[in-house]
Amino acid sequence: MHRTDFLVIGSGIAGLSFALKVAKLGSVAIVTKRQGIDSNTAWAQGGISCVTDEDDSFDLHVADTLDAGAGLCDESVVRTIVSEGPERIQELIDYGVDFDYHEVDGEQVISLGREGGHSMRRILHSRDTTGREIEEKLLAAAQAEPNITLFEHHYAIDLITTSKLGLATENRCVGIYALDEKEGEVVSFRSDRVVLATGGSGKVYLYTSNPDVATGDGVAMAWRAGVEVANMEFIQFHPTVLYHPKGTSFLISEALRGEGGVLLGGDGEPFMAKYDERKDLAPRDIVARAIDTEMKRTGSRCVYLDMRHHSKEYLEDRFPNIFQTCLDHGVDPSKEPIPVVPAAHYQCGGINTDINGITSLKGLYAIGEVTCTGLHGANRLASNSLLEGAVLAHRASEHIKAILPKERPASDVELPKWQRGDAEDVDELVVIYHNWDEIRRLMWDYVSIVRTDKRLHRAATRLANLKREVHEFYWNFKITGDLLELRNLVDVAGLIVESARLRQESRGLHYTLDHPEKSTELRDTILTRY
């Protein structure tokens, strides 16, 4: 059993930022199921939104966020996160994050991009690999911190609570079980302060811009432990992912449209003016639905993003990763439009928390994409995600620092060893892979950009059967990483469908043909297991 003062699950911007802040207070264990760098953060291209220009203001950023969120944002949360952004940006710079600069009147100033839904240029970026730049610098700082231990290739299985242990005390989280993939054994981590920073669940869909690690682990574990989950129906589909026969889900950043990129239909004509006065810089929910409509109307397999108004030299300098990847797939953006399609991108709902990352289970915090804080509402404003991760990490650490002197931990709790019982090695891995594929296909077909009551009912029926099958696998076979991810995927898919069935209106990212209008009632979809 590993004992630690702070236990962090996940190694993206939220988890690493939190770990670095609390390392001064005690020992920190970071548990991550692949390598430390494998996170959604590392895949973020566009940048991080923050008010840094004198022509911009917190009020404008707040207004843009509220507009994108379609009425469901918590304005006080939005204002807090936006106004605390500049300090968190300075911390990233202090860690060595190299944002892009340009010269103005002989001085170097931060370069700012613009993306859909933003009324001003306020996106700080490092070329088109901003997330990787942030991830690398924070990971290096964490690895250099003597109080932080990074446990790579450890799959978190479940949260351990005093209730599950049968203790007659106030229910709280006291640790986790995790699969040490390299050793093939289950180990336990004991801590009174557990932080879920596991990111999103894009891999629940067949087509996604997310890395393979995004299987909704944190939401699924929290749900199984009885923690409240909110607004899981709001899954953001990024409008522009590279379309290619090889099926590589490579993101074509919204920053391209911020630099004048224009979406073209199969006939070569722009179409966004038909759907929104902001045209190609409308919020993502509007652009994704517009593309979906155009593809269905014309029968085309994709639309196109035209960047030919920029020179090859500019594109290579501003978007080197995107430009080279397009070339590798036979597309020269300086000479021809880029074929693009929408794909699952960001989970706007999640574990229900307050502005300090506090969940409904004592001892458990959640920060970053895994949460529902009230910032995003029914649709996330572009590049607000990295900002939220940095701010919530800070606020959670400050809250813990404030209560630490008077906290009464369950220090006497011992965690029982994992009991494998009569579980056998999985003899037919093909069954697991088949179920994984079926979940992702049915979610794409029935619960994606446009929904109906009938599609949601079909998805719910099939998922109920799949959940029973996966439950049987879990208890009868020796656990593997693939089985754990499958278990989490089916749980999260079920939460998305249940939430979508409860919201009988069209708002933000949830659009249904059976209820096309917005309801006059503003409400969150709160799911409680117990």
Image: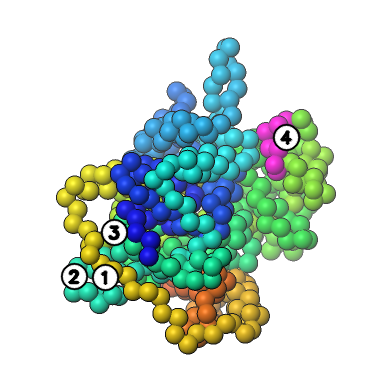
- Contact (Cβ within 8 Å) of mark 3 with mark 1: no
The reply, left or right, for residue 153 in relation to residue 309 is left
Q: Amino acid at mark 2?
A: Thr
Crowding near the residue tagged with mark 3, few <14, some 14–19, many ≥20 C-alpha atoms within 10 Å: many
476 magenta-colored: no
Between 422 and 119, the one nearer to me in the picture: 422
Q: Amino acid at mark 1?
A: Thr
- Contact (Cβ within 8 Å) of mark 3 with mark 4: no
- The magenta span reads 314-322
- Contact (Cβ within 8 Å) of mark 2 with mark 1: yes
Q: Amino acid at mark 4?
A: Leu
- Residue 502 image offset from top left, x and y in percent: 40, 71
First in sequence: mark 2 or mark 1? 1
Crowding near the residue tagged with mark 2, few <14, some 14–19, many ≥20 C-alpha atoms within 10 Å: few
Q: Residue at x 43, y 62 (%)?
A: 218
Q: Please, what secondary structure does the residue beneath circle 3 have?
A: loop
Q: Amino acid at mark 3?
A: Asp
Of badges 2 and 4, the one in the foreground is 2
**Marks 1 and 4, Cα distance to the nearest angstrom?**
55 Å
Q: Residue at x 19, y 68 (%)?
A: 170
Q: Residue at x 64, y 84 (%)?
A: 428
Look at the picture and state if 155 lies above or below 398: below
The reply, left or right, for residue 35 in relation to residue 28 is right
First in sequence: mark 3 or mark 4? 3
The image quadrant where one finds the C terminus is: bottom left
Q: Residue at x 57, y 82 (%)?
A: 425
What secondary structure is the stretch in magenta mostly built from? helix
Q: Which residue is disc 3 drawn over?
A: 192
The reply, left or right, for residue 422 in relation to residue 303 is left
